[in-house]
Image (cartoon, grey):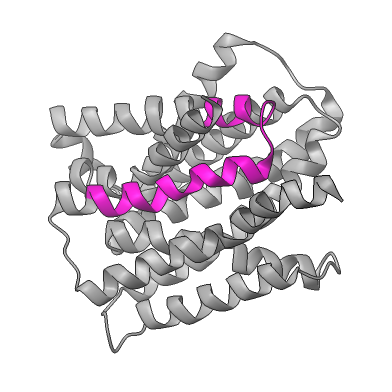
Amino acid sequence: MNLFFALLTAACWGTTYAVTQMSVPGWPPLLLGAIRALPAGLLLWMFKPSLPARQHWLPLLGLGALNIAAFFSLIFVMAHTLPSAISGVGMVSVPLFAMLFQFVVLRQRPSQVQLVAGGLLLLLGWQLFNPASMQLNSLGLLAMVAAIGCIICGSRLTQTLSGRLHWWDVLVWQLIVGGTLLALLSLGHAWFAPQAYLDAFANLDGRNLAGLAWIVLINTALAYGLYVWLMQRMSVVEFTFGGIANPVAGISLGTLLLGESYSQGQYLLMAGMIAASLLPALWQRLNRPVLAET
């Protein structure tokens, strides 16, 4: 049952790109980030109200700025500039960048299996994102790389802060703080470039509201709540088995909702990247009984 919830969580996250493109195309990324983070954080806070101590506000500000404000904005830039399938598949390259961060910053060498998987991700990603085979938006690709950096650094900050503050408070307050920062930035952006905001609200319709409701309630409040709940009941390695649902959801919804289509070779490259990202966890799972017997 835990694995089912892990699959559900990753699938919810994988719907971000297609739902955004279908329901709120052209909406400013800062506005979408604020709408996604702040209501979800307040909704989760209502289940367990709390107020952090004074010494925790500065770390929460930094975490909210990086893990929510910056990351959510970049995700919506990707959603507006890259195909849904490419966005979902591109994010499975996180392990490659995580290994680099781990080696350079933490001085921890990756295992041989991790190196093989990282090499495969690099090779397959180079082929998939090669401008000669597919024309992709440069801004979207830069946003993807920056979003991956936010994931890695934000996860490190979350681990550090969770040692001093209850994990629920870390979750809820980074959403509230990050959402508030995004709301303030949106107001500033709207002051200098109001037309995009005026167009968004002037043409507000049922499709917009349905998409925003999905992003806030399902994509953020439910998925983040499930993620935190699962981290108390299964290991990170076990949770990664559910991560395959993220790019699968991105590819499936991109095809069904947006009519995206790719060549057979491009689909094979996507499948190869997904398989490579799962290789270390699969290797560890297969070798666990052998280690236990010895």
Nearer to the camera, 230 or 199: 230
Q: Quadrant of residue 284?
A: bottom right
88 left or right, relative to 165: left
**Residue 191 to residue 84: above or below:** above
Residue 280 screen position, x and y as percent: 63, 60
Q: Quadrant of residue 135?
A: bottom left
**Residue 24 to residue 118: above or below:** above
Residue 247 inside the magenta-drawn segment: yes
Q: Residue at x 78, y 38 (%)?
A: 58
Residue 129 visible in the current orientation: no
**Residue 201 to residue 229: above or below:** below
Magenta part, dominant SS: helix
68 left or right, relative to 9: right
Residue 219 screen position, x and y as percent: 40, 34
Looking at the rendering, the stretch of residues picked out in magenta corresponds to 224-253
Residue 62 visible in the current orientation: yes
Nearer to the camera, 165 or 54: 165
